[in-house]
Amino acid sequence: QNDLCYLFDTKWSCVALDLGIPIEDRQETPALTFLVGNGSSMPMEHPAVRGKKFDSPQDYVRQRLLSAIAKLPPDAELSRDEALEHVDYIWELLRSQQVTSSSHNVGQDRIWNIYQKFTEEKLGKALRRVAKKYGQAVPDALASLSARRCSACGSAEGTKSMKTGEIVTKLVHCPCNTDGLPLYCGTLCQREDWKEHSDFCTAQKSEKGKKSGQKKK
């Protein structure tokens, strides 16, 4: 998930194609990013391509896009100027999906699994934020990643709940975060998710603190 060059070549180049940029398919020959001694990243093309090195993941992705744009025919539906405007948009979409890594041991597996679930949902929100910034709709190829989903059962907003079978018209927030996660399709899912969410719920901690303060008085 953190190797943006590999991610671009194996999954996200389809966004460029959807926008009309005829980028070369490298799903079978993706680039990889290596960490060098000073802590910086060094992307390298697949040996079957050229094996060329790049200064950074952004440099690699931009060069791939600019190379494809240079090959646009004069009568293409997408003009070169329009295509160039898409370069930063595609890069920011891609970068929004980068997950901060964290070391963990076996004893932390439960916490790590919760973190991954919450992170996956946050990535969808990041996609929508970048698309809005550029005045674009989320690309069709990424629509499934951007859907708001129930943190417990995974039901997407506007679809049938996997728990009740009823249409989820609007997901509800936990009081601890009225602008973000977790989201629930109903009280049943909220109750079932409590065992995991209670470790993170600041609303519960705040309420306990108030009660503790009242007892001291």
Image (spheres, helix red, strand yellow):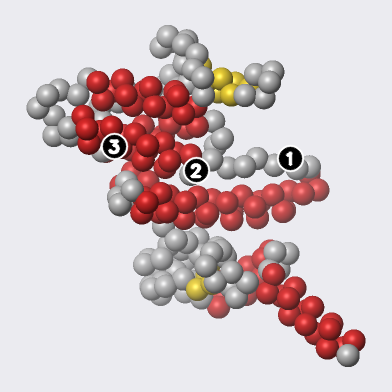
What residue lies at 61% left-to-right and 50% top-to-bottom?
A: 116
Q: CA distance from mark 1 to mark 3?
A: 38 Å
In the rendered image, which residue does mark 3 sit on? 85
What residue lies at 37% left-to-right and 37% top-to-bottom?
A: 88
Residue placed most toward the observer, 133 or 127 = 133
**Residue 118: where, in percent of width, then height?**
59, 56
Sequence order check, earlier mark of 3 and 2? 3
What residue lies at 37% left-to-right and 46% top-to-bottom?
A: 142
Q: Nearer the viewer, mark 1 or mark 3?
A: 3
Report helix, strand or loop for mark 3. helix
Report helix, strand or loop for mark 1. loop
Q: CA distance from mark 1 to mark 2?
A: 19 Å
Callout 2 amino acid: Gln
Q: CA distance from mark 3 to mark 2?
A: 20 Å
What residue lies at 41% left-to-right and 66% top-to-bottom?
A: 157
Compared with 93, 179 (above or below) is: below
> Residue 103 has which mark?
1
Residue placed most toward the observer, 207 or 107 = 207
Compared with 73, 175 (above or below) is: below
**Residue 215: where, in percent of width, then height?**
87, 88
Q: Specify whether 214 is left or right of 90.
A: right
Question: For the N terminus, which image quadrant?
Answer: top right
Sequence order check, earlier mark of 1 and 3? 3
- Crowding around mark 1 (Cα neighbors within 10 Å: few <14, some 14 to 19, many 20+) is few
Sequence order check, earlier mark of 1 and 2? 2
In the rendered image, which residue does mark 2 sit on? 97
